[in-house]
Amino acid sequence: MKLELTLTKREQFAENIYGFWFKAQKEISFKPGQFLEWTLEHKNPDNRGSKRFFTVSSSPTEKEILLTTKIIENPSSFKKSLKELKSGDKIMAEGPYGEFVLPENKDKKLVFIAGGIGVTPFRSILKYLLSAGEKRDITLFYAANSAEEIVFSGLFKEAEENLGLKTVYAVKTAPEGWQGETGHIDGSMIKKHIKNTDNFIFYVSGPEPMVHATSEKLIKAGIKEKQIKHDYFPGYDEI
Ligand SMILES: Cc1cc2nc3c(=O)[nH]c(=O)nc-3n(C[C@H](O)[C@H](O)[C@H](O)COP(=O)(O)OP(=O)(O)OC[C@H]3O[C@@H](n4cnc5c(N)ncnc54)[C@H](O)[C@@H]3O)c2cc1C
């Protein structure tokens, strides 16, 4: 399905993480966790061109479509143009695509593992569950470079209070008084919070190297490959 989207609002969620809200010209049907292929025509595109995949980080229960991305210093020409979009400007998108979605069986126990910007599909899924009032057994492990780079913590708190979500934050360097974990998410960190991981489904999302490394650590910790689902974000070296 091809869509024309109109920017309504830009938000800054953290130091270099931005949200772009779009109104779709026709209704789009997607599942929480899916992504679109976005096309932003712009002058002098760099060698990576004018197309990118981005998760729909809003829930299907929200009126508008949210694209959340990390924009670093000297970004690609695509992200530079995205950041410069004004309300009323248009972008094209195609989709939805992807299997990084909730299992049909609502009793399945789930572990969500996010590395940095890889948190986007979990925002969509948890917002959806909150809107639907649907409780599932979910533990979210969310690794970020620093406490300042953590986004959507308000939404996750709401999901803790209303849905029983368990959240474990892990940062590279802990600020004073930090209550969460420090370092990479690995088997021992997971086992500290979940005693028996048999029959859980693990959803790992983030920069490609992080997703590979985390999956290997899970397998080393005895979790079976078929228990793990991946959402790779290419183009990022680290979280
Ligand atoms: C299914 C799927 C879902 C995704 N969902 C999201 C999402 O929700 N949010 C999100 O942010 N990303 C998402 N991505 C990743 C996204 O598609 C981009 O690959 C990513 O954001 C990097 O963007 P960028 O290429 O514009 O580079 P930038 O983010 O601008 O830069 C990333 C890296 O590339 C280097 N770089 C910059 N310009 C160049 C250049 N011209 N040549 C070579 N290297 C350069 C930078 O130094 C930096 O290390 C998803 C990908 C997939 C496949």
Image (cartoon, helix red, strand yellow):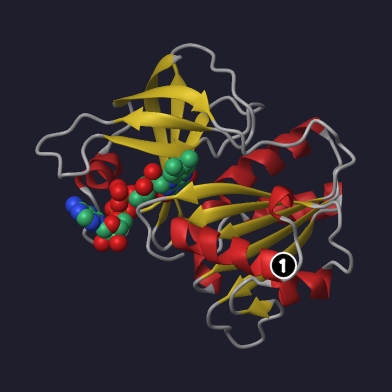
Residue where numbered disc 1 is placed:
168
Quarter holding residue 186: bottom right
In the rendered view, does 10 fall on the left or right side of 201? left
The x, y position of residue 133, in whole percent, is 84, 35
* In the image, farthest residue toward the left: 44
The x, y position of residue 83, in whole percent, is 29, 45
In the rendered view, does 138 fall on the left or right side of 32? right
Relative to the observer, which residue lies in front, 161 or 55? 55
Amino acid bearing label 1: Val
Residue 154 visible from this viewpoint: yes
Residue at 86% x, 57% y is: 198
Residue at 68% x, 78% y is: 181
Relative to the observer, which residue lies in front, 127 or 209? 209
The x, y position of residue 151, in whole percent, is 56, 57
SS class, disc 1:
strand
Residue at 9% x, 38% y is: 44
In the rendered view, does 167 fall on the left or right side of 108? left
As displayed, is residue 56 above or below residue 196?
above
